[in-house]
Image (cartoon, grey):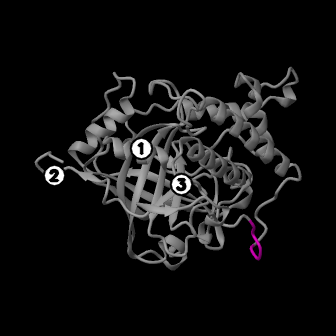
Amino acid sequence: MGNPTSQDADLIPDDLSGLPPWEAVPTDEAEAVKAIVQKIETRVRAAATSSPARRDAHPKAHGCVAAEFNVLDGLPPFLRVGIFSQVRSYQAWIRFSNGSEKPQKDALGDGRGMAIKLMGVERSRSGTQDFIMINSPAFFVRNAVDYVAFQEVANQLRFFFPSLNPFKFRIHELLMARAITSRIVSNPLSVQYWSITPYLFGNIPCKFSARPSGSKFTCNDRSTPNFLHDNLATCLSADEAAFDFCVQIRSTPDSMPIEDPTIEWREADSPFIPVARITIPRQSFDAPEQVAFCENLSFTPWHGLDDHRPLGGINRVRRAIYETISRVRHEINGVPRNEPVGISKLFTPIRSDGTP
């Protein structure tokens, strides 16, 4: 079903040798990353004593669906980079999820995730290209040191108000967190998703986004605890869905920072430009084998081509965290780590007469 992958060698290298120095790595980042990894691994192992090991973030999946990722024809030369260098189609898996570290009712405020895994990617060490996005253009943690602080508090408000000293308040971060959790989402197919962190686009930085395309869905019932899954299943049983996959080129460095993902890159400075179209065909995705497959997938922004190397401190943190959580989850659950190579064995299309 896939290629075994478990080594650091499957990831994009984490150096920028020979490239312009966009990144500014703080001297205390390495120790901060080490502390984060240790804390999260301890938490994942402790939680797995009474249940299977889960992801530390985005553990609740609404569904893992098969899709096609079609690079657009007629792109101008400056956009024909990496994955987008030639007109072609990639098979893909897309996992929709909730961000909370503990599965909860969908009606509660939360970040919503869209993780895309392209397969058959030549020159990728893992054979895949992952794009990881949430339904907000900005994050609420600036860097690795702040990530440690967020992980250490029992009450999340203490992260934003760590002491009585108002100069240490994280008001901007609080506003970003509220912006994420206050978004009303009734259907994963009806919202826009952003990469929040920057990436290389050949030799310049960019951000990615996926925005719904085509007819709006009316599957928006919010009466069940898992309505995001239910609405996703209802919609895809009746019709296909589509997203425009877009790139935003960094045009004004002063207002589009690399090391601070809490700052939104404004579209007024640089609009998102469609470079591919994602098509999710009619399908059923609740078969036990597919649910288990979805749970065992590993996503990391460091799966992919060097042309799309992740940039910035939060992405450097992710490199260590995602690899550690994947290793620990699969070790505890006794499941090999495989990168998928296709969709044919699990994909259950729904025909025009409504039958699988």
What x and y, as percent, mark residue 305? Answer: 58, 69
Question: Cα distance, mark 2 to mark 1?
Answer: 24 Å
What x and y, as percent, mark residue 116? Answer: 47, 54
Quadrant in which the N terminus appears: bottom left
Question: Residue under circle 2?
Answer: 351
Residue 17 lies left or right of residue 74; in this view the side is right
Q: Measured along the vertical axis of the image, is residue 267 above or below residue 77?
A: above
Under tag 3, what secondary structure?
loop
Q: Which residues are magenta?
A: 15-19
Q: Main secondary structure of the magenta part?
A: loop
Residue 43 lies left or right of residue 17; in this view the side is left
Q: Quadrant of residue 72?
A: bottom left
Tag 2: residue type?
Arg
Residue 292: assigned label: 1
Q: Measured along the vertical axis of the image, is residue 5 above or below residue 76?
A: above
Rendered residue at 35%/59% (across/down) = 343
Q: Can residue 117 be found in the magenta stretch?
A: no
Under tag 2, what secondary structure?
loop
Q: Residues within 10 Å of mark 3 (few under 14, many from 20)?
A: many
Residue 151: assigned label: none
Rendered residue at 56%/29% (across/down) = 102
Q: Earlier in the sequence, mark 2 or mark 3?
A: 3
